[in-house]
Image (cartoon, rainbow, N blue to C red):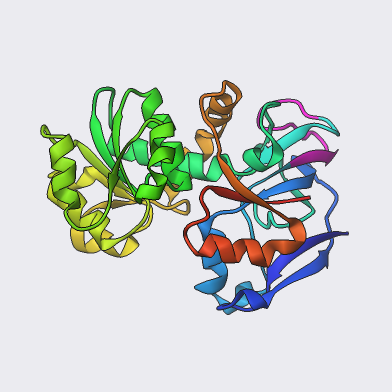
Amino acid sequence: MAQAWVATDYGSFDALELRDVAVPEPGPGEVTVEVRAAGMNPTDYKAVLRGGKREDLPLRLGHEVSGVVTALGPGAELASGGGAVGTEVLAFRIPGGYATSLTVPAKDVFAKPEMLGFPEAANLLLAGATAADMLRAAEVREGDTVVLHGASGAVGISFLQQAGLRGIRVLGTASERNFDEVRRFGGEPIPYGEGLEQRIRDVAPKGVVAAFDAVGTDEAIDVSLALVEDRKRIVSVAAFGRAESDGIVVLGGGMPESRRFRDSVRAELIDLARAGKLVVPIARTFPFEDARAALELLSTGHPGGKLALVR
């Protein structure tokens, strides 16, 4: 048996329960992982607070973990190759990551780079793959100047690093208290708020070729529309309501093209982390038993970096 956090209802973190759950033996092409850290993402708290289908309850939370392999099914091999009991791994895209142990498809499990701690490894791939997908969608190239709304968030920090490796100049909107974090990862910070469009024009008089939105505010989209003529180069992972009305590109992990790409880029992101070229800042870790408190902090939108549940 293992333990797992489940939502028994929608609308409140009070509906979260820590339950005993069975962990099936791994079948062909599956592995069982003892979880050392569960990554935390906004989709986790939104799944609880915003709700969904009643038939999905009780709902298991979490999409990415790191830990140690405890069993392999017949013919199972990690996505990165090989694998044995005791191998340290990270896994994404998997269901029910807020658990002490789980059995998942081996194709979603990769050897963990030694230099990454378990909390960092558990938070690498969802944000990293999302950022990579944004760069893909706008087809930006070396020498381009772009604007990124929400540069100090988890997706933003990964975006800054990946764009920097491609030689792309990023003007990153953020609150002034997060300017040092934006600069640390190669962005040029610009305060959001009234006058944002002009501030961007002042530092990029030749214009920006694309705009990326990781926050979903009307300000972010309105300013992007004013700055970028080609709406196919305005890419958001948050402003879903603006796609139809404004013709911008909105991406989500459940969309077929994005899903295929995000799965395909996982190994590359892990290699970048292994080479020290992709860093995952951890703001805070919480004991596994304190998932409610961790989700409360995450839901404020200002955790200061990635959060992880650890054992």
Q: Within the magenta stretch, is there residue 230?
A: no
In screen coordinates, is 211 left or right of 303?
A: left
Say which quarter of the image contains residue 227: top left
Residue 218 at x, y = what percent? 25, 62
Between 255 and 282, the residue placed more toward the observer is 282
Is the magenta region chiefly helix, strand or loop?
loop
Residue at 70% from the left image edge and 57% from the top image edge: 98
Say which quarter of the image contains residue 275: top right
Query: Quick one: quadrant of the N terminus?
Result: bottom right
In screen coordinates, is 229 left or right of 122?
A: left
- Residue 171 is at least partly visible in this image: yes
Residue 120 at x, y = what percent? 63, 39
What residue range appears in magenta? 67-83
Residue at 67% from the left image edge and 26% from the top image edge: 115
Residue at 35% from the left image edge and 36% from the top image edge: 135
Residue 39 at x, y = what percent? 63, 49
